[in-house]
Amino acid sequence: MNRRQFLITTAAAVTSGCASMDDGNNSRLLRVGRVINAGPVANYAADGVYDAFGDLGFFVISKEGKLTVLSSICTHRYCKLKAEPDHSFYCKCHGSTFDPGGNVTAGPARRALPVLSATVNERQELIVTVPGS
């Protein structure tokens, strides 16, 4: 399967909005992740944290030409994080902080921010998959 077929298949799955899972006792509905086009890779040329998609669940971090996509949701109680000028992340709900790599620098959070799946399509656009909740 080439990249184009993968993206089309993924988009079709996301369009359905949910998937069924049978745990042996009953069926539950689980939300499928969302695929978001974060725009041209050229938009992230300068090193730094890009928070334009924070409300959609992720930050784009550019460092030395490499892009990393981190969840913008705190791993403690799932509050939205704020990107700080020093490129760290702060949770206003309970005070957790994370370094630019997503590692916990102050609790109560204990787990690092998840790195999200991201690819660059044939048009040089950053395509990010944000997990469902």
Image (cartoon, rainbow, N blue to C red):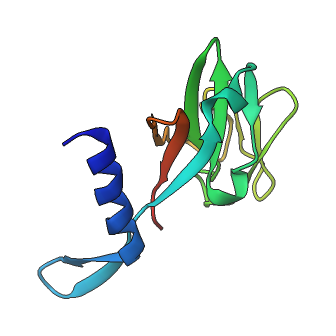
Position of residue 131 in the picture relative to residue 7 (left or right): right
Front-most of 85 and 98?
85
Q: Quadrant of the N terminus?
A: top left
Query: Which residue is at the far top?
Result: 64
Number of disc labels: 0
Please name the residue shown 57% across and 26% down the image. Answer: 67
Q: Residue at x 32, y 67 (%)?
A: 13
Q: Quadrant of residue 36?
A: bottom right
> Which residue is painted at 24% across and 39% down in the image?
2
Q: Is residue 78 above or below residue 54?
A: below
x, y percentage for residue 109?
61, 46
- Asked whether residue 50 appears in the rendered view, the answer is yes
User: Quadrant of residue 131 in the image?
Assistant: bottom left
Residue 111 visible to the viewer:
no
- Pinpoint residue 125: horizontal percent, then vertical percent: 55, 38
Asked whether, in this view, residue 83 is left or right of residue 16, the answer is right
Q: Is residue 47 above or below residue 15?
A: above
Q: Percent position (x, y) of residue 96?
A: 72, 45
Q: Residue furthest left?
A: 24
Residue 10 shown left or right of residue 133 in the figure: left
| Residue 30 place in picture, x, y as percent | 35, 74
Residue located 33% across and 56% down the image: 8
In this view, the residue in front, 128 or 121, is: 121
Please identify the residue farthest to the right as the structure is shown.
Answer: 85
- Residues 6 and 62: in front is 6
Residue, far front: 123
Q: Is residue 104 above or below residue 67?
A: below
